[in-house]
Image (cartoon, helix red, strand yellow):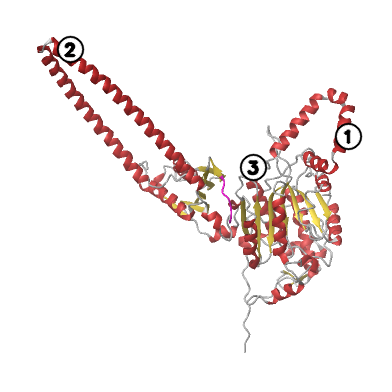
Amino acid sequence: MATKKKTVPPKLNKFMHPRNPYRTPPSFKKLATQYPEFRAHCAYDVAGKVHLDFKNPDALRALTTCLLNQDFGLEVNIPSDRLVPTLPLRLNYLLWLEDLLFLAARRCGSVGSGSGEGDSPAPPPVVGVDIGTGAACVYPLLAAAHFSWCMLATETDPASCQSALENVQRNGLAGQIAVRKVEEKTILKEVLDLPETLAQVSTLKPRTGGGGGKGLSRSSLKSRHSDSQRWGDACSGLNKEKEGKGEEEDKEKHKEGSKTEEQEGKDDINGKEEEEREEVQERDYIYDFTMTNPPFFSSEEEADTMAKSKKGRGEPNAAPTGTALEKVTEGGEVEFIRQMVEESQLLRDKVRIFTTLIGTKAHVREVKRLVQDAKPTSCVFTEFCQGRTMRWGAAWTFAAGVSLSEVRSKKEMATKKPIVLLLPRTLMSVYSVPAAWTKVLGWLKALKVKVEVFKSTKYFVSANVKAFKLTWLHQRRRRREREREGHHQQHNGKGAKEEEKEDKGSSSKRKTEDEEESENKRARIETEGEMESETGEEEKQNMEEEEEEELDEEEELEEEENHEEGRSTDKDSQQGTSTGGWGERKPTKGGLKCLLRCNFQVKQTGGLISVEAHYLGGSLGKDGLNQLVQYMRNQLTYPHTQF
């Protein structure tokens, strides 16, 4: 009986991060030519094509070290008994972090992109934490060499910690990466908030020349700003709590002894104090992010069982590497992440964004529940696709005004089809993408929504849109009401003129009759006329007061409606999806919650210009985006009608 052939999952390289250089596989022939240690593990066929034995751990180790040197200028030694990191996954994780940081920078205004040229000063450097860095120390090395970030790397295993430290020193990055040995079961607490850790990290700063390497097209958060002042308050604050009054007395004596020097350099000191205040204002967090690739399994038996239980799948292409210490932890990765989430609540004021890698799909739902129970202001879950392997990522923050769910994976964007609106040639005198975007932007401005353009070229425009009020519904009804009001006002104007003519005729007639009456009757009529005029003025005044009260009531009702809209619950963000901003609290604007968040892309394909609308989130759901696109279709149907 023929055995059933196991299926091989398709390659997922097309869903890699768009800036990942390994979306295009590296040239083994080129590597074999440049690196003899890699060539030793290669085989050649009759056509001259190079083949690598991925079942050989030494071949995997040579491949990783040669790629690190060729693409990033790093010399890394990986011990033979330690885990060999795969670079596509590591870069996917780091690039996702860069996207999250760029988002947080725009929201919080304290860590931003740019080189610091011009009048505005350069932002503080990005400082991250790699929990369980491993012997290769690959995440901190890539973060420092290519993204110009400063990193704190922690490790529990003494041998791996020593190897990581040697790799950092070998690449001349000791001034940018701090490696610390920590005790078992130590994740965030008792390491990130220690005075000695802060003192060690306070000395880190990016290299003047920035990061080297090739492949990545953007590193938006590079910084060459000195951060010595930035850590002063944090270190001194913790030291004061630890040392108490003795340190305060020493400071007072030091101030008295240096009083003359302070007077002489008063201007310099004042300038430094201003810089310190600016530093504190522009940065509220000590660490920008934490990252970790936790051990997947709770025991070696579980690892072996899971490997055998993958029915219907082919054998792994690569040989397993790493020790049990790197793959196994007590309680498995779910328990590890549970502890991390609990400790993140205690360090919410010190870390901007917490992140973790998830190795097993079956654990994603439980991790989502753990993160939701912590009640962060925003969280997001994503997928990392590389080769035939998938991993998952989780990120959450307690920072106000940050919406992490705006960062989406390429797989998510590819699997969720957008709403497409084709623009006819008759719509514009010049049929081009910039002209089409001008038309779309005019529609959006008429709806009073927030528009933020991310990319604008001759052939492509991408912009995010946020709506805090439902301004695109019932446009026809509003137009008809305005038309009826206009007709009513015209009718009232004609009626008023006719009544005025009748009043003039009757008044002249009354005057003739009054002249024929007696003086006593005339006096009585004049008296009655004066009383009527006074009554008319009172009625007019009362009518004006009633109109003012009605306007006030309408304004109060409008404010109450806005307030109710602001209190409305974002169902999508509470219930969430597998990849979106699940369990997220949406940012507000003027007390109103975001009703719709979407991305508009104007592009030209095959001679036609189209508008693609991608749903990002909001309490209205996808129906709200459909309604907004329908409003645009109405504008195409009635181009000269103001809806």
Foreground disc of the pair 1, 2: 2
Amino acid type of the residue tagged 3 in the rendering: Cys
Extreme residue in the top direction:
519
Q: Is residue 467 visible?
A: no
Label 1 and label 3: CA atoms lie apart by: 37 Å
On the image, the x and y values in percent for residue 178 come to 82, 50
On the image, the x and y values in percent for residue 479 come to 34, 42
Taken as a whole, is the magenta stretch helix, strand or loop? loop
Query: What stretch of residues is rendered in magenta?
Result: 582-587
Image quarter in which the C terminus is found: top left
Which quadrant of the figure has residue 34? bottom right
Left or right of 88, for residue 444 = left
Q: Name the residue carrying label 3.
A: 108
Q: Name the residue carrying label 2.
A: 523
Extreme residue in the bottom direction:
1
Amino acid type of the residue tagged 2 in the rendering: Ala
Q: Residue at x 79, y 44 (%)?
A: 207
Label 2 and label 3: CA atoms lie apart by: 79 Å
Which quadrant of the figure has residue 21? bottom right
| Mark 3 crowd level (few <14, some 14–19, many ≥20, 10 Å Cα) | some
Label 1 or label 3, whichever comes before in sequence order = 3
Q: Which mark is residue 250?
A: 1
